[in-house]
Amino acid sequence: MVSLDMDRACFQRGGDTYLSAPEQADAQPSCSDHHSPERGGRARKKGLILAEDKAVPTDKIAAGLTRRQLIEIDACARCGECLAWCPVYAQDPRESICSRGKLRSLKGLVRSGLDEAEQKEFLEGLYECSACGQCHVVCPVRINTHELWEQARESLVKAGIPQPEQQIKHLAAIREFNNAYAKPQQERGAWAEKAWKAGLLREPVRLWKEHRASVLYFAGCTASFDPVMQAVAVQSARLLQEAGIDFAILGPDEPCCASKLRRMGAPGFADEARKRVDLFREQGIETIVVSCAGCFKGLHADYRGILSPSTEVFPLTAYLDRLIGEGRLRPREKVPLRVTYHDPCHLGRHNQIYSEPRSLLNAIPGIELVEMRRHGPFSACCGMGGGLKLAKPEIQKKMSAARVKEAEDTGAEVIITPCQTCQIGLTVGVEAISSRLRVYHMNEVLIRSVCPEVCREHIEKAFAAAEE
């Protein structure tokens, strides 16, 4: 039995001591009986069977994994802790869905191959996953599961085994249009012009090519193109203006961060990342503020080793919290709301951004913050990551509904999150169970305290009037 200290994240399992994956590097790997070629009399090949006339050699799959990942496949203690915490398994309780099952299948794949039934089971489990990283947090041997699943997806794609169809279409749009919405790049900065004309900004938002500012505001695809989420970009710009920050946007030159290529296992992410890093370097960009949690993870974590050490990347929430602490941004108006905070996986578990969003909320007069049972490193995923909503929308809906029910238990009126993708995902859950809760982006409650005339409702009305 594994015991977990929620506050200190300490793990104990009887009197046993578990070696971390690197410490097991010299141990002899052992193939589990589950994947023994003789078990059950089922025919196996040294390959992953795609069709009767085609099989992929398993060395192609193994070659795509790092040495550490190959060790991690063999490091699973099979304790089952991941089953207890996995938000996907909670909605679809099959062994092949949890990390323990996927690790066993992946080990069998690279060692002895899988038969067709096992292949189908493994692929379904691999993509029925939001790569939230909860299993990594609770794993006694700290297997870096979410990165392993991303790399396994890429290895399979390179070997000729494609992603689910809806993910393929989504990735194709990113490659063709440089955004996931299949919109012309010329429209990427349109939100800024509309906001200025509607009187929502103190001054026009400048383009980087016309003014090399101190800070680049990177809006991302969702805040640039989604009509509802454009409010996030407008509010971000206004808050930076209120704090007196010298910033600019790339507008039509802003690329998709391409992090979804990494999340869904599309080959070529490193090359795409280098193109974006080259753009930042050529434009003299050294400080980037990002309002999308997924883009932040992409630029801050996925670009690590490629991005110049002199280039700083900040999530907007942490940046605004610092500005409040410095007295440059002052929440004045009272916002009488009882709220609960949802930690986005990309900010929390993947980048350890926990205290800053809560500090920001506590700085707003009138806000009462109440935590959900699962919060911080143990926050339950809403299901929007890793391409899960594209591959399994019904599972995402169930995950979101479960998270909304947990939020209801706090007695809060509003769920707050600094991630517009989580905002979209949680709204799915609210609608699924007809919850009384509202879902706000972090910007919404802060803007109501700093300059309430730029609340989301006013932005939507102003933009709608401009369309008439």
Image (spheres, helix red, strand yellow):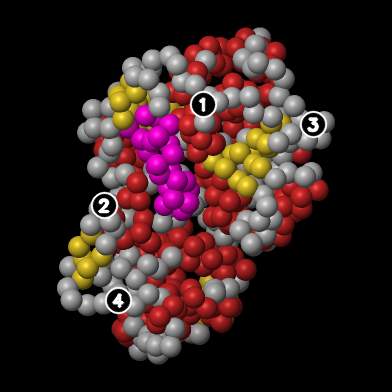
Q: Earlier in the sequence, mark 3 or mark 2?
A: 2
Res. 252 visible in picture? no
Residue corresponding to mark 2:
7
Q: Is residue 28 above or below residue 284?
A: below
Residue 327 badge: 1
Q: Earlier in the sequence, mark 1 or mark 2?
A: 2
Badge 2 density bin: few <14, some 14–19, many ≥20, Cα 10 Å: few
Query: What's drawn in magenta, residue-wise?
Result: 340-362
**Label 1 sits on what residue type?**
Gly
In 3D space, how far apart are the residues under numbered discs 1 and 4 (Cα atoms)?
Answer: 47 Å
> Closer to us: mark 1 or mark 2?
1
Tell me the SS state at disc 1.
Answer: loop
Tell me the SS state at disc 2.
Answer: loop
**Label 3 sits on what residue type?**
His
The quarter holding residue 291 reads: top right
**Label 4 sits on what residue type?**
Tyr
**Label 2 sits on what residue type?**
Asp
The quarter holding residue 193 reads: top right
Residue corresponding to mark 3:
211
**Quadrant where the C terminus is found in the figure:** top right
- Asked whether disc 1 touches disc 2, contact meaning CB atoms under 8 Å apart, the reply is no
Q: Earlier in the sequence, mark 1 or mark 4?
A: 4
Badge 3 density bin: few <14, some 14–19, many ≥20, Cα 10 Å: few
Q: Residue at x 20, y 62 (%)?
A: 3
Point out the residue furthest to the front here.
Answer: 326
Q: Earlier in the sequence, mark 3 or mark 1?
A: 3
Q: Earlier in the sequence, mark 4 or mark 3?
A: 4
**Quadrant where the N terminus is found in the figure:** bottom left
Residue 18 badge: 4
